[in-house]
Each structure stands twice: as C-alpha cells, then as structure tokens.
Image (spheres, rainbow, N blue to C red):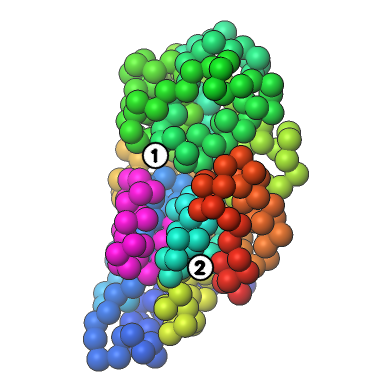
Amino acid sequence: MPWRFLLTLVLSFLLSGCRNSPRNSGSDFVYTIATLKGPSSMGLIKLIDSLSRGKDHSVQVKILNEPLQVRKMMIEGSADFAVLPTTMAAIAYNKGLDYRLIAIPVWGTLYLCGSDTTITRWEQLRGKKVNIMAKGMTPDVLFRFLLQKNGINPEKDITLDYSFPSHIDLANAIAAGQAHLGVISEPLASLVLQKNRAVRRIFDLTDEWMKFESIPMAETGFMAKNSVIKNNRELVEQMVSSYMASTEWVNQNPDSAARLIVKYDILPDSDVAVKAIPRSNLKFVRAKNIQLQLDEYLNLFYKMNPDIIGGKIPDENFIYE
C-alpha cells in the first residue's frame, strides 16, 4: 500500500477521536506520544504536522529534550506512547512501569566528533579526553564497548568527561571549541559541523559497532502503555502504521521533511536537516519481528553492566505481539 494512501487512512482514524475506545467514552480524552527532539521526532514529523493541522484529534505529540523527561512522563503515566533509548525502555519495563516495546524506529545515530585532526585510528585516542553526555546512558556504554574492543581500557587509557549534562550542552561545547572530542548524536552532529568548520566526524559509532557485532544497533524504542494496548488495540495498530508511514515519507522526501523539521523547531536550518536525515538511520521495524536480535542487543549491554538495562534481560512480555 503506498505510504500516501496509508497515512491518509491512519490520520482519518486518529483525527476521528477513536470513538470505539472505552477510555474515550463520554470524554474528550487525548492520547499523548512523548518523543525526543532528534531522530525520534524527525521520523514522526509528517504525523506531527498532520495532527497539528487537524481538529478534534485524539492524539497529541510532546517533543522533549532529554530521555529522562520521557521517563518522567512514563512514571507519571501521562505518556500513552513513548520514544526513548532501547536500554531505557528495558529499564522501565524491568522496574515495573506499565509499558511494552512496540518497535525500533532509529538504528544508530552516534558519532565521535571533534576538532582534533590527529586522530584517524582508535589507538590514537590513548591519553585523550573525550566528553560524553550522561554516564551509564547509551552513548557512554557504546563508546566504552568500542574502546574495549579496540584494546583501550576506558578506566586507564583515556579520560571520559561527563561535565556537560545534556546532549545539547555537549554539542554546543564542541561547536564553541570548549570540548575538543565528544560523542554526539544526529541531528546535532550535522548542526555542529555547520557551526564550526574545524569540527569533523572522526568515527561513525554505528559502523564501528558493525565491525564487531552481526546484529544492528537497535538504539531507540517505541513503547505503548499496557493499559492502552488492552483497551484500544486498534489505536496501537494505527499508531504503528502511522509512525511507519511517516518514517517512509521522511526518507523518501528529505527536502520536504527538512522544512517540517525546521517548522517544529527540531533543527534551525533545513540544509542541516537534509544532511542529517540519511545519517539518522530512520527505519521503523516492529519489535516482534526482530525479537531474537533485540535479545542479543540487550544481552551485550547486560554483560557489560546489568544495571544498564535494569538488572536483567526483559521477559517475553516486554515485546508487544
């Protein structure tokens, strides 16, 4: 089915108010998608735009700056759908939050960037300082994993600096020359390179990961509240279709998508957005179709530190069937 027709059908459903939902009976209930400012919202941008122009719709999207803000909404129960790092999705499930994993919409967006032109091999990182946002989060864990795979002890051979509290703060520091090496995500990496021509991409961490692992980097997860799944499965399936259709549209129409990405303040410049789209690895894949790969992905992090995914591999109920 062509994405244009599919997205039209989905939006007509979402804009209708989902009247068959027990949760909507006799009320003007609005379902909330909590997503992140970056690739997660870039893939959703066609749906975000359509919802913003509709009337009496039953779905709204909140674009947040940091994964911890998404988690806060999940703890409060105010997010019916949530987009956040897959490792955090596992933590949320293992800690008893009432959510299940629906899909993986983003497949690796991290880059080591900096103005240090002397580095062309991992070995040359010895003795250097690399800034990373949030100890124990995906960028930190992945970078440590790759350091170890390349024979570098992250505790002894290199200095890892966590002084910049958010990915936006870190990106701004690299652009301003306050940090010479840092692990940052798209689309911020493209934005930094535009602001500071002395900065370059040193390593694509997704490519580096694939040198050692046969499974793709399932970086970002799309979750739904279990109560929504039970009470309104039709809405969940329509959200799956709409997110998938929106992602396909973005990949096929980067110029148009870039204009929307600027319109909704995800990036300030459409030229940067056009460059960032193909580097953000946007592809919506249902979790149930890649369950073995997801188990292997999470198991790698578990072996490094069980706390990274909440102390255990999530059980079979983690993934929405």
Looking at the picture, tell me which residue is in the foreground, 52 or 309.
309
Residue 100 is marked as 2
Can you give x and y, in whole percent of width and height, for residue 246 in the image?
Answer: 49, 61
Q: Amino acid at mark 1?
A: Ser
Mark 2 and mark 1 in contact (Cβ < 8 Å)? no
What element does badge 2 sit on? strand
Quarter occupied by residue 163: top left
Can you give x and y, in whole percent of width and height, for residue 144 in the image?
Answer: 57, 30
In the figure, 70 relative to 216: above or below? Answer: below
The residue shown at (32%, 38%) is 268
Q: Residue furthest left?
A: 27
Marked residue nearer the N-terminal end (1 or 2):
2
Looking at the picture, tell me which residue is in the foreground, 261 or 185.
185
Q: Is residue 61 visible?
A: no
Tell me where the magenta segment starts and ends, as one range: 61-83
The residue shown at (47%, 52%) is 88
Residue 140 is left or right of residue 53, and the answer is: right
In the figure, 25 relative to 3: above or below? Answer: below
Q: Residues within 10 Å of mark 1 (few under 14, many from 20)?
A: some
The residue shown at (32%, 68%) is 77
Quarter holding the N terminus is bottom right
Can you give x and y, in whole percent of width and height, for residue 303 in the image?
Answer: 64, 44
Looking at the picture, tell me which residue is in the foreground, 7 or 90.
90
Q: CA distance from mark 1 to mark 2?
A: 34 Å
**Residue 43 magenta:** no
What element does badge 1 sit on? helix
Circle 1 is placed at which residue position?
270
**Residue 66 magenta:** yes
